[in-house]
Structure formats: C-alpha cells, structure tokens
Amino acid sequence: MPMFTRRAFGAGLLAAPAITTLSAGATLAAAHATPKAAPAMFDAPLGAYRITALFDGMAGLAKGFFSGPDQGEIDAALAAGGITGDALPAPVTAFLLQSDDRTILIDAGMGAVDILGPGFGRTFDALAALGITTDDVDTIIVTHAHPDHIGGMIGGDGAIFANAEVIISEVEFGFWGDAGMMAQAPEEAQGLFQIAQTMYASYADRVRPVADGTEVAPGITMQLVPGHTPGHAALSIDGGDQQLMMIADTIHNSVLHLALPDTRFGFDVDSAQAAASRRALLDQISADKMLVAGSHLPFPGFGRVVTSGDAYAYVPASWM
Ligand SMILES: [Zn+2]
C-alpha cells in the first residue's frame, strides 16, 4: 500500500499546477520555444527501430528532495560527481521509436503543465524538426503518469495526439484513476491525480492498460519497476545485437542514485520500494550488459551501468 506522506509528493511544490488552454501541438511548440534554443535531439539505430532522444526541458531538483540515513554521505557523493550547488540537474527526455510502419513515443514531456518552471515542452520542437506531426504518432507508451511524462499529451481541447493509442501499466492506470486513493492523498498530490485523470479522459477508449510483462509493440516489453509510482514501468527493447532498457525514472540523478542506490527521493510514492526496485533493475542491466536510456539521465540519456562494490556507476554510451 503506498504511503501518503506530505514528503512523499514533494510538499508544496505541486500545489495547483496549471494546465494552460493551448489547443494544438504546434501552438504548444510556439509557446514553449525558448528564445534562441534550437531543438535538441539525438538518434541511433536500434534493431528494427531508430531511437531518438527528444529534449523536453531542464529541471533543477532541490537537494532537499534527496535524503538518506547519512546526509554527509550524500553530500560527498554529489561532490565527487562535481555537483556542489543546491539543485541537482534533471533533464526531462522523451524518446521516439520509428520503424518502417510505426511511430511510437515513449512519454511526451511536460507540455504546457507548469510545475517545474518555464522552458519545457520542447519535445514538440524536436518532433517538428524531424518533420513529425502529432497526428503521425500511432502509439504513446507511458512509463508512469507523472506530469513530466504525460503533460505533453494534454491541452485545452483534450488529446494532443489525435491518432495515438496510449499504453500504460494497468497498476499505474488504476492508481491515479482511483477516487478513494485520491481522497487519501495529501493536498499537494491532488494536482497529480487531476493531470492523470485529465489524460485518461482526453484519450478515453484509446487508453490500453496492460499487465506486467506485456509485449506492447514489436520487440518492446513492459517491465514494472514499482515504487516511484505504484505502476512505474521500464521498457525492454529488443534491438537485435543490442538490448536496451528504458529505465524511465528509476534514476533521478546519475551520480547519486548509482553511488547510493537507497537514497530516497521526495517524489516517490514509496521510497523503500523504489530503492529495492532500483537495485534489482540495476543488477539486471549490469549483469546483462544492456544499454540504458533514462528520462532524467544526462541528455541524450543513453549509457551503461556497471557495478562498483555494493553500488553502481553510470557510463555514458559511446556506441554510436
Ligand atoms: Zn520524471
């Protein structure tokens, strides 16, 4: 059972998120284009697919959201990774998978939801630069229903992606849609439920909740990594000679969460479960020598994980 504490949802930060009344992806792109900022993306072959990292925006996560039994250890780990300020850099990255007959988005960025400040929604700039319209996207695989992953799916008129089927774990779908769960949640979390429910209503019968282990598209299998949210999911992608695990929010900081994997994060619904899931997934990825892609890894978010004693280390990919 998730533990609802004020801390669990980042007390205060999430009060009254605003969804603006913009109505189309193109308008969103215009509204969010940072002056003089070119679209940022990076692509590489992956079996039958081409995978492209789409930069949505950059958040600074307050150091106070990360906690553990020994704060000195956390400070030392961050300092060793060159992070000395009060905010930990957290890029928000969505991923595009294209094959001969499929155009799949993995998450859609923050869009017009205003929680972490300005400068988000650049996923749309990147899609436009690739010549892809929101109508071209046939599938959106949602790793979890937090606003930096689904905000880009919704606008004033409802669904931004007119033709996309939306795939989400059935656990995640049920949790954020549960009125009883919402009633128990603290004030600060109400906006998260509202955003998830707005997305559900916007896509209605185009939402397909799936069980853990489902192959959600050719060669793409959902694997639950619960804790950050109850149905938070990774995606294992068969790239032929390269296997990739899209780990979503298993790692919020590539220095801290690998050096000290049990570090709690303020936006986790259940931090202890998230830590256990993190260790299990990192063990699997490092043992199988998989490529990883992550929503909040240093852009473009591709790398590998190696073990280091009782902990791990992140090595940015050099395979392209
Ligand atoms: Zn996230």
Image (cartoon, rainbow, N blue to C red):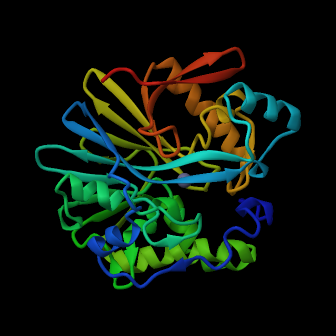
Where is 3 relative to 243, above or below?
below
Q: Is residue 60 left or right of residue 315?
A: right
Q: Residue furthest left?
A: 100
Measured along the vertical axis of the image, is residue 12 above or below residue 303?
Answer: below
Q: Residue at x 31, y 73 (%)?
A: 160
Q: Is residue 24 visible?
A: yes
Q: Residue at x 80, y 28 (%)?
A: 76
The answer, for residue 145, to whether it is visible in the render is no
Relative image position of residue 35 (x, y in whole percent): 39, 62
Between 280 and 49, the one nearer to me in the picture: 49
Name the side, left or right, on which 222 lies relative to 84: left
Tell me where residue 10 appears, x and y as whole percent: 73, 62
In the rendering, at what x and y percent does residue 38 appear? 33, 52
Front in this rendered view, residue 272 or 154 = 154
Image point (27%, 20%), residue name: 241
Q: To which quarter of the image does residue 154 belong? A: bottom left
Q: Nearer the viewer, residue 128 or 49?
A: 128
131 sits left or right of 146 in the view? left
Q: What quarter of the picture does the C terminus occupy?
A: top left
Where is the N terminus found, in terms of image quarters?
bottom right
